[in-house]
Amino acid sequence: MSTVIETSMLDHSVVEFYGGARRGPCLQITSLKPIQVRDTLLEQLQDEGFIHLTLDEATILRDVLTMWIEKQGGQQ
């Protein structure tokens, strides 16, 4: 089961989920923009897996992560 964490970020969503006994509580940050096709395979591979955040989005994400970490700390 997963839970969407509400944020004011416009280009990314945040989802909390349980990663099983090995990984425990996890967060997934997903870009809401479609993946861009690059000119070469190398450029495409280098682009995947990275999330580009503006300073405003990074600040918002910091606040979301802080709240999430504090919530998880009470469950350990």
Image (cartoon, rainbow, N blue to C red):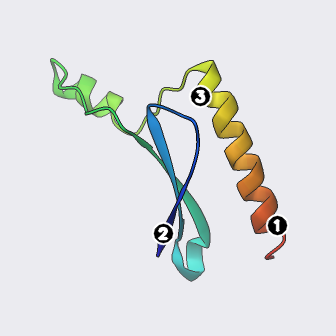
Residues tagged 1 and 3 counted as in contact (Cβ below 8 A):
no
- Determine the CA span between mark 1 and mark 3: 24 Å
**Which residue appears at 68% of the width and 46% of the height?**
64
Mark 1 element type: helix
Of mark 1 and mark 3, the one earlier in the sequence is 3
Q: Amino acid at mark 1?
A: Gly
Task: Give above or below for 3 relative to 55.
Answer: below
- Determine the CA span between mark 1 and mark 2: 19 Å
On the image, the x and y values in percent for residue 42 come to 24, 26
Kindly identify which numbered label has been placed on residue 60.
none
Query: Which residue is label 2 attached to?
Result: 2
Taking the image as shown, residue 36 lies to the left or right of residue 58, namely left
Task: Give above or below for 63 relative to 14.
Answer: above
The answer to which of 47 and 60 lies nearer the viewer is 60
On the image, the x and y values in percent for residue 60 come to 66, 34
Q: Nearer the viewer, mark 1 or mark 2?
A: 2
Query: Which residue is label 3 attached to?
Result: 57
Quadrant location of residue 45? top left
- Determine the CA span between mark 2 and mark 3: 22 Å
Kindly identify which numbered label has been placed on residue 73.
1
Taking the image as shown, residue 50 lies to the left or right of residue 26, namely left
The answer to which of 27 and 63 lies nearer the viewer is 63
Of mark 1 and mark 2, the one earlier in the sequence is 2
Of mark 2 and mark 3, the one earlier in the sequence is 2
Residues tagged 2 and 3 counted as in contact (Cβ below 8 A):
no
